[in-house]
Amino acid sequence: MGCFEPGSRTINQFAVVSYLPDPLAGFLDQLRLQLTPDSNPHAHVTILPPRPIPGDTNLSSAIHQLAEGSAACQPFEIRLGAIDIFPVSNVIFAELAIGSEILHELHATLNSGLVEFSCPFPYHPHITIAQDLQPGQVEAMFQVARNAWAGYLGPRSFRVDAMSFVQNVARGIWVDIAKIPLGSPATS
């Protein structure tokens, strides 16, 4: 999950994600740990990449805005496709075969007001498998990820019925602030 240049991580960023369920999440978390043992995985698809929120922003107001923005989005299915690499950042990821269009619409709707932010990279929904790799490691890690994915016999799709508003509180540590169901009217 990232809106910033490779290697630049800052704390006190906020994001909106949807977590994957097990057994798919467990498989992807184990694969990520195999490739990057120092990571702290929690398989998810990012809806709003990490961004600062002004210090005077009331987080309750941001959560309310996100709930209002997601009220029209009904739960939907995501299916994972091939393993690929982002060329600039060398992030290894699982492409989305189904669900990308809805995520683009949700991202466009939510990226406004209190949580609006302009990322240096275009929004590209995906599931991160490995990041922060040394350039010499990327091709070998990519092959490991592709082979593991080819051998995975479990489910490759999942239902997105909620999203989580999260905060980066320390390097690699994200905490859930609020869970927001999709397709539900916001409450005052």
Image (spheres, rainbow, N blue to C red):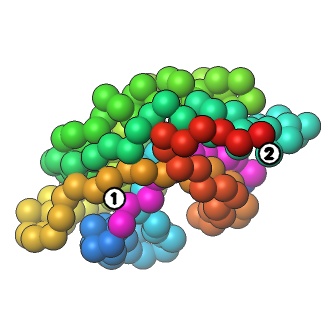
Which quadrant of the figure contains the C terminus? top right
- Mark 2 vs mark 1, CA separation in Å: 32 Å
Residue 84 against residue 120 in the figure, above or below: below
Residue under numbered circle 2: 60
Question: In the picture shown, does residue 23 fall above or below 73?
Answer: below
17 part of magenta stretch:
yes
Which residue occupies the foreground of this view, 90 or 120?
Answer: 120
> Which percent across, then down, holds residue 35?
33, 69
Q: Which mark is residue 185?
A: none
Q: Which residues are magenta?
A: 12-21
Q: State the SS at label 1.
A: strand
Residue at the spot of label 1: 129
2 or 1: tag closer to the N-terminus? 2
Q: Nearer the viewer, residue 119 or 107?
A: 107
Residue 158 in picture, x, y percent from top left: 28, 56
In the foreground, 68 or 47: 68
Asked if residue 35 lies in the magenta stretch, the reply is no
Residue ID at (74%, 30%):
114
Amino acid type at circle 1 is Ile
Residue 45: percent from left, percent from top: 41, 49
Query: Visible in this render: residue 57?
Result: yes
Query: Badge 2, how many Cα within 10 Å: few under 14, some, many 20+?
Result: few
Label 1 Cα crowd, 10 Å radius (few <14 / some 14-19 / many 20+) = many
Q: With 100 as the anchor, is 170 left or right in this view? A: right
Question: Residue at 32% across / 72% down in the picture?
Answer: 22
